[in-house]
Image: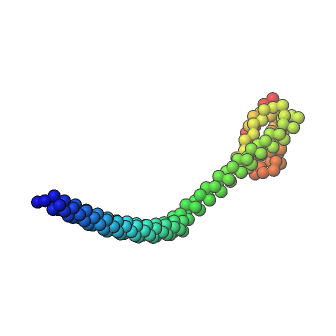
Amino acid sequence: MTWDNALLLRLVRLNCAFLLAGALVAALAACSESEKAESRKNVDTAVEKTEDATVAAARKAADLAEKARDNTVNYFKSPAVKEDVEAAKQALKNAGGKLGSTANDTAITASVSAAIARDPELGPRRIEVASNAGAVRLSGSAPSAEAKQRAEQIARNVNGVDKVDNQITVTN
């Protein structure tokens, strides 16, 4: 083989190698584009599935919230809850009544004690006064039966007193 033929053969081989490399690059580029397209398609599919799942979850949450609201409304409309509310109202009313009664008893006790203390014969003596729901109990000592009766009359004249239990003893 002559030098010209060898060079020509090399050139042909080199040319073939370049053509083959170009074909490979073109094939790889085409392959890359198809992989990109496939990848985009996979991402789009995943996004669609996520959107569908989000919509389904939102619907489920709305349904659950609606059921919870309905259950709450039904609970508060139930007879048992209405009875509990009425019982609580009555307990508050009773507590308020007891508080008012205690305040009333304290005021009655103070008024009777002050009125007896103003009496010249009973004032220096120790007369104990206790009241409960308008009933007053007097105890201690008085110098005479008349003073004992006067203490009872003083207690009866105080506003709010319904009954007097006179336990005062007469001592000289």
In what quadrant of the picture does the N terminus appear? bottom left
Compared to residue 91, the image places residue 128 above or below, namely above
Compared to residue 24, the image places residue 96 above or below, namely above
Q: Position of residue 65 (x, y in %)?
A: 49, 66
In what quadrant of the picture does the C terminus appear? top right
Residue nearest the observer in this picture, 61 or 27: 27
Residue at 25%, 65% in the rendered image: 19
The answer to which quarter of the image holds residue 53 is bottom left
Q: Position of residue 104 (x, y in %)?
A: 74, 48
The answer to which quarter of the image holds residue 39 is bottom left
Q: Is residue 78 visible?
A: no
Q: Is residue 40 visible?
A: yes
Horizontally, residue 91 falls left or right of residue 108, namely: left
Compared to residue 30, the image places residue 128 above or below, namely above
Compared to residue 15, the image places residue 120 above or below, namely above
Q: Residue furthest left?
A: 1
Residue nearest the observer in this picture, 13 or 124: 13
Name the colour scheme: rainbow
Q: Residue furthest right?
A: 120
Residue at 75%, 36% in the rendered image: 128
Residue at 88%, 35% in the rendered image: 120
Residue at 67%, 51% in the rendered image: 98
Total residue callouts: 0
Residue nearest the observer in this picture, 152 or 170: 152
Horizontally, residue 47 falls left or right of residue 12, namely: right
Residue nearest the observer in this picture, 126 or 169: 126
